Structure formats: C-alpha cells, structure tokens
Image: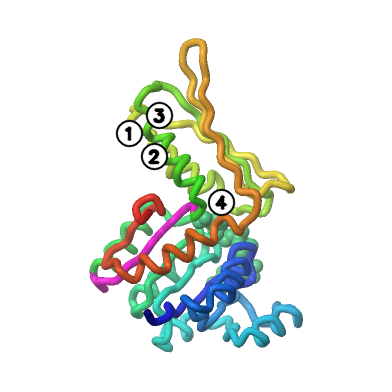
Amino acid sequence: MSKIKVIVAGALGRMGSEAVKTFIEHKDEFELIGAAVRDLKNVSDENLEFHKRNNINLTDDLNALIESGEADVLVELTTPDSVYENSLFALKNGVRPVIGATGLTVDDIKELSKQAQKSQMGAILAPNFALGAVLMMRYAFEISKYYDKAEIIELHHDKKVDMPSGTAIKTGDLMEHSLGNKVPIHSVRLPGLVAKQQVIFGSQGETLTLEHNSIDRTCFMPGIRLSCKKVMELKQLIYGLENIL
Ligand SMILES: NC(=O)c1ccc[n+]([C@@H]2O[C@H](COP(=O)([O-])OP(=O)(O)OC[C@H]3O[C@@H](n4cnc5c(N)ncnc54)[C@H](OP(=O)(O)O)[C@@H]3O)[C@@H](O)[C@H]2O)c1
C-alpha cells in the first residue's frame, strides 16, 4: 500500500509537535510532506534544525503547501481562529482534513460537511482522539438512559483557549438525547493538568462517576493515525472518533 502523505498544521504546538514525531516514527505508513507554523520568524534554531534533519518542509504558507497537490491529508491542530479556514481550504483543494483543533461552531461544521459532500472528499472531526475518552462518551450516553440528572466537570491545562472543551460539549450533546435536558458543564483550567473529564450521574441515594485522564499527549496519537487512514476511504465528513472505530 502506498504511504499516506500528510501535512501537520500547528506543527510546533503541543499536539502538533507530538503528531510530527508520530509520523516520523511511522515512516512505513506515512510520509510527512510538510509542517505548517503560524510564523517562521518565530521558530527557534533548534526546531529549524530538527525539521531539516528529518527532511520536513517547515513553512508558514500552509495554503501553498495544500495547493502543491502533494498531500492526501491535512492534520489540523491549530487554534479556534484558523481551524475553519484551513479545513475549508483543504477540502476545496483536494486534501482531506483530519481535524483535532476545537472551536468550530455548529454552522462551521455544517459548511465543512457541505463542502466535503460537494468535493466528494473525506473529512474527520474528532474533539478527542483518545480511545478512553471516546469510550467514556459512549458509556455516558448509555448510562444516561437510566438517570435523570448528570453534570460534567472538565479539567484542562491553563493554556487551553476554548472553554468548555469540545469533548465536554460532545458528551453533553450525546447525553441530552436520553436525559431530555441540558447537562451542566463545569470547566477548570490549572497548570499541571493535561486533560481530564468526569461525568457524574446522581439519583436517589447514589452517584455514579465516569472519569477519563489524559496523562500525556501521546494518548491522542493512535487516534490521529487511524483517522488519517480512515479518511482516505470516506466521501463525507464524520464527526467523532467513535464513528470510525
Ligand atoms: N482532538 C483532540 O484529541 C485534542 C487533544 C488536545 C488538544 N486538542 C486541540 O488541538 C488544538 C491544538 O492544541 P495544542 O495544545 O497543541 O495548542 P497549542 O500548543 O497552542 O498549538 C497550536 C499551534 O498552532 C499554531 N497555529 C495557530 N494558527 C496557525 C496557522 N494559521 N497556521 C499554522 N499554525 C498555526 C500556533 O502557533 P502560535 O503559537 O504562533 O499561535 C501553535 O503553535 C487546540 O484547539 C486544542 O483544543 C485536541
């Protein structure tokens, strides 16, 4: 099978740099054709040297990289202010977005979905690439059939820009169907945390808690690699890793 050619956008961020490492480690399946940063002028010599040593085209012109026609997949790990434009541009130019960055609105998702249909291209949007978090969402949905009340607490590092997290919003949306009411979400932002979520169900004389902990960002990498493979087979946008497992 030929290698899947990927671009990582947000390549020097916490998630992006981990994704770059994982594609280097999985050279047998993937070819990392480019890594996009916001501004090359701000890149340290150490980072420039790392990308040069690994033969990765480090650029601040993501659009040119997409338009070059070399890539199959864009792994989108930037920030809420650029994820929509980058993903749309990719879809319009023959590159399938695998979107990890959060911050897309319901309308953004609808537009991306329309563009995927129009281009007959795959796209995957996953608020959480960690297997345990996806299982937590699935079981939260199941358990909510048996309870009337639940709340979510999501705890993340203090540099996370969006609040509540995409995972908490998605979990709450899933549960709402069974509970019949909106699930309150409480957000905590503190240094020292990576990502953690609790779903607490309460009923007469008892509580039931589901908890997922991301101890470090390597937990997201198997989900990113799987999404890059699956997106090649799709002709529409899929929302949620649980729908491709
Ligand atoms: N789906 C999941 O499983 C999952 C897990 C964890 C995090 N996330 C999400 O993934 C995203 C990244 O998280 P993070 O912790 O890695 O954040 P981060 O460390 O802030 O990284 C984001 C990176 O994107 C860069 N960037 C911003 N706009 C760009 C553009 N137009 N072109 C190229 N690069 C651009 C930023 O550069 P500057 O610093 O110069 O702005 C920064 O290096 C966030 O939205 C986060 O919520 C998703």
Q: Answer left or right for 205 relative to 191.
A: left
Q: CA distance from mark 4 to mark 3?
A: 27 Å
Q: Nearer the viewer, mark 4 or mark 3?
A: 3
Rate crowding at label 4 as few (under 14), some (14 to 19) or many (20 or more) other CA atoms within 10 Å: few
**Residue at x 63%, y 66% (from the top left corner):** 13
Q: Answer left or right for 191 relative to 219.
A: right
**Placement of 32 over or under 87, stated as above or below:** below
Specify start and end residues of the magenta stretch as a single range.
118-128
**Residue at x 43%, y 34% (from the top left corner):** 140
- Residue named by callout 1: 177
Can residue 102 be seen?
A: no
Q: CA distance from mark 2 to mark 1?
A: 7 Å
Measured from the top left, where is residue 237 in percent x and y? 32, 61
Can you name the residue that lies furthest to the right here? 45
Rate crowding at label 1 as few (under 14), some (14 to 19) or many (20 or more) other CA atoms within 10 Å: few
Q: CA distance from mark 2 to mark 4?
A: 17 Å
The answer to which image quadrant residue 170 occupies is top left
Is ligand 1 within 8 Å of the beta carbon of the residue shown at mark 4? yes
Q: Which mark is residue 128?
A: none
Three-letter code for the amino acid on which mark 4 is drawn: Asp
Measured from the top left, where is residue 41 in percent x and y? 69, 82
- Residue named by callout 4: 162
Q: CA distance from mark 1 to mark 4?
A: 24 Å
Of the numbered discs 1 and 4, the one sitting upstream in the chain is: 4
Quarter containing ligand 1?
A: bottom right
